[in-house]
Image: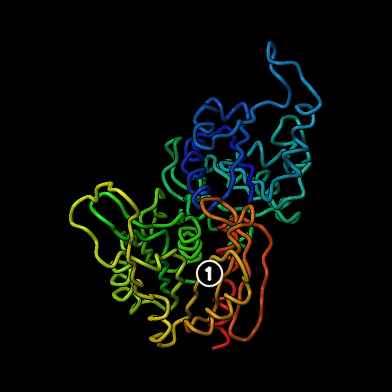
Amino acid sequence: MRIALGVTGGVAAYKAAELVRRLQQEKLDVQVVMTRGAQEFITPLTFAALTGQKVITEMFSAAGAAPANVESAIEHIAVAQRIDLLLVAPATADIIGKFARGIADDFLTTLHLATKAPVIVAPAMNVNMWGHAATQENLSTLRARGVHVVNPDEGYLACGMVGSGRLAGTEAIVEKVREVLGLRRDLVGQTVLVTAGPTCEDLDPVRYLTNRSSGKMGYSLADAANRRGASVVLVSGPTDLKAPEGVDWVPVRSTEQMQDAVRERAREANIVIMAAAVADFRPAAPHDQKLKRGEGNFTLELEPTPDILAEIGREKAGRILVGFAAETERIAENAKDKLARKGADIIVANDVTQEGAGFDVDTNIVTLYLRDSREIPLPKMSKFDVANRILDQVLLLKERR
């Protein structure tokens, strides 16, 4: 989801940098719009570095800049149409008054009039300015129009006075963003165990058997569950991914190590999601020394690895169990068979030969197969969105129980 963050000219403008980071942690794409006053307190370069995006500071091109074109002339309309929310933090008394009176004399005020997205303002100002009848009247006007207001905190202000007017805390603003955008906290009190990534089975000290899993689907599930309030344990094979902040990360390498970690941590879990691409076979007799090239063919004997999903399926003890099936043919048939044999409640199946649904990409195309014979096909979407759709079904199953 996309947010336009308006930063206006107050001492609290520096706090908007921290707010950008927190919004990004919520998987929100942030476009910063700064007023001229804001640039007196913090530079656009700071926000450009944080967001990786152009920071909009002017309605029109500055003198000596590249000549205006159709795209730049209607940029405020383009931004207005693509955002899901306009958040202004800090919001000065000046910007609140302009919003209330419909003034459009810079990019931010014009954006406010042009967008149909919901609007949140987080005021920050001197205590007397906050309490002035004009400010309160303007806020009443905005509230009547549906604008959401995050009231300022009380405390010591930059001007040396004490009272209301200090910018609300970052978490309070983020919580209002969640509320307005419908971002949920419906897994509070649940413990979710997620497996992710590949496993590696050693052939000798140099070589091993593995697969192409990047771990992105499992890490997206851990991230989504964490954001929805769950206590998350992420048991991960080797990947290049960074574990989401706040998640209990348990690194493993082999299938047997993953089995041990899952056995130990599943006891505390209400929900187990086995998204790891576990190796199905391992060398029957790994070599202590590096195998040398020889004449003729080489025969490698393989044996099955532990079936972790089936083991948890036999010992569910009331847990919701989700498994994955990465297939190349007979997708529905193989998924339904796995659902029955493994004791899972949901099998998430995909055809890894499809573009945008295979390994090491940011999207997926899956179908959810449930024990009540329902099949829920999902279109191509980000793995984070797929993760949330899976969690939605998990919660529905828990409610029915």
Image location of residue 283, percent across then percent down: 30, 64
Residues 244 and 20: in front is: 244
Q: Which residue occupies the extreme left position in the image?
A: 288
Identified at 58% across, 37% down, the residue is 7
Q: Quadrant of residue 146?
A: bottom right
Q: How many marks?
A: 1
For the C terminus, the image quarter is: bottom right
82 relative to 15 in the view: left or right: right
Identified at 53% across, 84% down, the residue is 340
The correct choice, above or below, for 213 with respect to 157 in the image is below
Q: Quadrant of residue 191?
A: bottom left
The correct choice, above or below, for 316 with respect to 5 in the image is below
Residues 285 and 276: in front is: 285
Q: Which residue occupies the extreme top position in the image?
A: 64
The residue singled out by tag 1 in the image is 325
Q: Which residue occupies the extreme right position in the image?
A: 70
Image location of residue 19, percent across then percent down: 50, 45
Residues 67 and 205: in front is: 205
Identified at 68% across, 50% down, the residue is 84
Q: Residues within 10 Å of mark 1 (few under 14, many from 20)?
A: many
Image location of residue 358, percent across then percent down: 57, 56
Image location of residue 42, percent across then percent down: 50, 29
146 relative to 344 in the view: left or right: right
Residue type indicated by callout 1? Ala
